[in-house]
Image (cartoon, grey):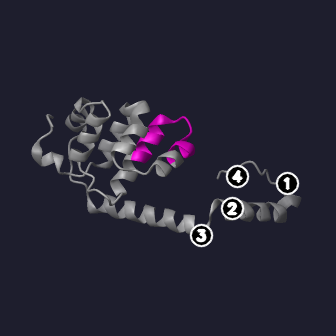
Amino acid sequence: MFTDISEENLDLIPTDEILDELAQVLGVLSFQLGIELGLPITSLDAIQYNNGRNLVAQCKEILFQWRIDEKVRPTIRVLVQALVNVGRGTRCLEEIIKTVGVKTYTQHEEVEEQKQGKVTTLFKKLFSEEKLVTILLSWFYITEPYIIPFAWLIHV
């Protein structure tokens, strides 16, 4: 694999800044990149559904999901290979690293991601879509006399 990224930087985990910048330039390749990075199709479908036509948001969620995934250590090397595999090449990532720099991915970022993942998992266990709709409908029924707009409640 030929790249201008130094060998020592290839084994680092990409920081939030690198992933944020990369998400800005990926565009329609996000789904293919997610597959190359090993994310399940079901996760990618959910990401697309949750973010609608917002490609940047889709890309960000895919990249951040990949980084917290524990199947493969999420290094810049893995990201470079995936970019090559989808035909994007490494130039965009090289430019981002030159601009943003490569800082060491801090434990704080990792702890925050783990917390977010645990909260999301807990929320999913406690409130499946069906349960959440039932709870919201019950709440609406109770508060109906106050004529609270219902449309803003359903964001499932």
The residue labelled by disc 1 is: 147
Please report the residue visible at 47 percent of the width from the left and 35 percent of the height from the top: 55
Give the secondary structure at mark 4. loop
Q: Earlier in the sequence, mark 1 or mark 2?
A: 2
What's the residue type where badge 4 is placed?
Ile
3D distance between C-alphas at marks 4 and 1: 15 Å
What's the residue type where badge 2 is placed?
Glu
- Image position, residue 10 (x, y; %): 17, 46
Label drawn at residue 154: 4
Give the secondary structure at mark 2. helix
- Image position, residue 58 (x, y; %): 47, 41
3D distance between C-alphas at marks 1 and 2: 23 Å
Label 1 near label 4: C-beta < 8 Å? Answer: no
What's the residue type where badge 1 is placed?
Ile
Q: Which residues are magenta?
A: 47-62
Please report the residue visible at 42 percent of the width from the left and 65 percent of the height from the top: 115
Give the secondary structure at mark 3. helix
Which of the two discs, 4 and 1, sits closer to the camera? 4
Label drawn at residue 130: 2
- Image position, residue 18 (x, y; %): 29, 42
What's the residue type where badge 3 is placed?
Leu
Name which quarter of the figure residue 118 lies in.
bottom left
3D distance between C-alphas at marks 3 and 4: 17 Å
Classify residue 40 as left or right of residue 134: left
* Nearer to us in this view, 2 or 147: 2
Label 2 near label 1: C-beta < 8 Å? Answer: no
Q: Earlier in the sequence, mark 4 or mark 2?
A: 2
Q: Is residue 60 magenta?
A: yes
Can you say whether 15 is above or below 108 in the image?
above
